Amino acid sequence: MSFRKRNIGVSSGVDRTPVPNSSTQPQTATQSAPSTPGVRPSPDDGRPTTSTGSPSLDNLLAGHGGMPIGKLLLLEENGTTDFAGALLRYYAAEGVVQDQKVHVIGMPEQWGRSLPGLIGPAESADEKSDRRKSERMKIAWRYERLGEFGAGVAGARAPAGGTGDQVSSTDSSQPTQPAFCHAFDLTKRLTHPSIGNMSYIPIRPSNEPLLVSIQKKLEAAIASSPPNTVHRIVIPSFLNPTLYPPEVSQPENVLPFLHSLRALMSRPASRITAMITLPLSLFPRSSGLVRWMEILSDGVIELCPFPHSADALSTSGAATSHEEPPQGMLKTHRLPVLHERGGGSDQNIGQDWAFTLSRRKFEIKPFSLPPAEGDQEAQDNARSDKMPKKADLEF
Amino acid sequence: MPSQLALPHLLTPYVVSPPKSSLTVVSSVLGATGNWLVLRFLYAALGNSPVSHPGYGDPEFETRKKRRVVLVSFLRGWEFWRSEAKRLGLDLARLTEKRQFAFVDGLSELFSAPSASSQPAPKPQHYPGAGIAPRATLPIRSQPVPTLLRQPLPASSGSDGASPQTVREPGPTKRLHFAGSGLAALDTIEKEITMVIDELKTSGPGEDEDEPEILLVIDQPDFLLAATGLSKGIGATEMGEWVMGLQQAVSATIAMISADSPLIHNGSTFAHQAATPLDTEHAAFAVGLAHRAEMIMQLRNLETGAARDVSGVLRVSKGGAWGQREGAAENWEEKEVLYFVQRDGSVNVFGRGE
């Protein structure tokens, strides 16, 4: 059977190549994805990805170094804090900077005006070239030190994704390679020419169900934009009763909406990513509705901020004296693409993650409880532990 | 690694030729999805490498006999199934051309108003593309779109170049729409699916053998229940009958459902929190299907936490209808194994500690 053999050839060429051979993969994939700023092929399987605006979240997404186009990420947050909202702002700001079309659902235009400011181009360029030089050494050092563990982390900051020498080759050949991910400052306000380009879909009562009308407006907005535009759909605190009328959170309203959103995003010609935040205190994970919303999403990430009183406890940790204490735990319940295929083979799976939000970045790193003070034996054990600790990953 | 086989040995007896008029339930949870297992079922039925193991239903039955498969997917689009099957060496687009496979798209337009072009077109040939241009569902835009779609596709879609006329991306043959409420809406969907099944039955590739066996795979019918609910007059009973109705049209059925604990346990009277209608109906539907199934394959996460070389646990157990068939010689046993889906899409299935 001739066609069968050819098929095997194709799939083994593109898909079966394991990650280490990534030097050839991005090149083949670049042809299929024309160079759009802010979109790059995944180092894992070459599908186009775009940045979430925070490098450490990009790293978390199952080795793709970014958010695969056509995927929907659900960010859930416990408690009354708004860490997920900060991630969402980074995501929207990144879209604005990359000239992508950002659709904000349920928020007034003030939301768009409060996006975090881009850290100045000159400043970031300087920082970047410095950082890149030292990074190259660090990547090599980290590979040596950590083996496989750093693989997912390495792809993200280097623009072409991959190993250290690849970074140097892109440096020489394309000196003006546009950045994949930018740095933002939460205390500043974003001023960018394309910020007026954001579209807002307000929650307004109409004679058809609310989510149906939102869906229609969204489809109209996407259909009316030029074909190659990359879209970002941003839905801050979905179903929050201060924004949405109560009947919206009925399953027969929410689930068809998410299903249609999924259908819209999975159309072959569309280039859409979406991020939704959901307040878990109002909609607990143990309810069937939220579980269905999770099943309908491609990625599910839960943020569990520490209660405020835990600050003292976490600062006392010996290992963290020189860095900021984590502000909460982060759980990955589902990752885009990986879990759709069956899940499992990612190095990041099964890690306990902690997050720290500072003025300039949202950082996600492996969480390890420091040994209890005075417990000398445990401290020694922890030092000789095989698991890479925060200190190894932090630089 | 011994994983290069598309069908791992341990898995073969369970996925090859399910017995006649049987129902197999595959249950999955959030972190352990069953798409890879569905693909294995497709491969066992459609793959053209000989499967040496006798099927779990009919041991002496000749397993080489070609089956035809209808895949109804509510959560995932054609693009996903096509590309994932390709990793197994299964060209679904070509199999659709050869009338061995049909895809029913329950994702694209399930809840959006059907565009004018998609209504009177029972034959798949009238659907050249899987929505090349973003199909607007607004009535004002639906007029110009069909002319766009009828145009010949760019050369990139002729994947093999062997027959550029026919090897167009066939795309989903049928798109389901949910309209109205209650049994009428379910009946419409059932009719549309049986229409595809009948079409596949009758249009043989020229051989005058007896009626081909059709394997029906339904990806997450429980979504239909969750998204409509009692307010639209659809409950567990109606959904159960809906699956039953489809079962009658085919020789074997595989249903993939979600079995996350909130969806199953909230419905019980011992649950800590008050169950919503969604929870109780889902539990009733899932348990009802399990009672009618001959075999249940449950996928779940590893209890001891995630591991780097294990994707999850697969438990195969007897369903409520096991052993009720006359003359059934069951040659499979209940088993619990671990599985690992690798990055390239191949699957390792192994016992604990192996």
Image (tube, helix red, strand yellow):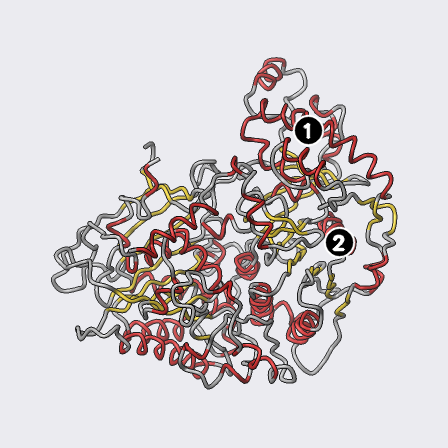
| Residue B33 x/y as whole percent | 45, 52
Residue A378 in the image: above or below residue B85? above
| Residue A239 x/y as whole percent | 67, 63
Dot 1, crowdedness within 10 Å: few (<14), some or many (≥20)? Answer: some
Q: Nearer the viewer, residue B54 or B261?
A: B54
Residue for point 30% across, 56% down: B47
Residue for point 30% across, 71% down: B247
Quarter of the picture containing the N terminus of chain B is: top left
Answer with the quarter of the image where residue A372 lies: top right
Q: Which residue is mark 1?
A: A136
Dot 2, crowdedness within 10 Å: few (<14), some or many (≥20)? Answer: many
First of labels 2, 1 by sequence position: 2
| Side of A328 where A17 appears, left or right | left
| Residue A194 x/y as whole percent | 82, 59
Q: Which residue is mark 2?
A: A98
Residue kind at label 2, given as amino acid type? Gln
Work out whether residue A83 can be spotted.
yes
Residues tagged by mark 2 and mark 1 found on one chain of the structure: yes
Residue for point 82% across, 40% down: A359
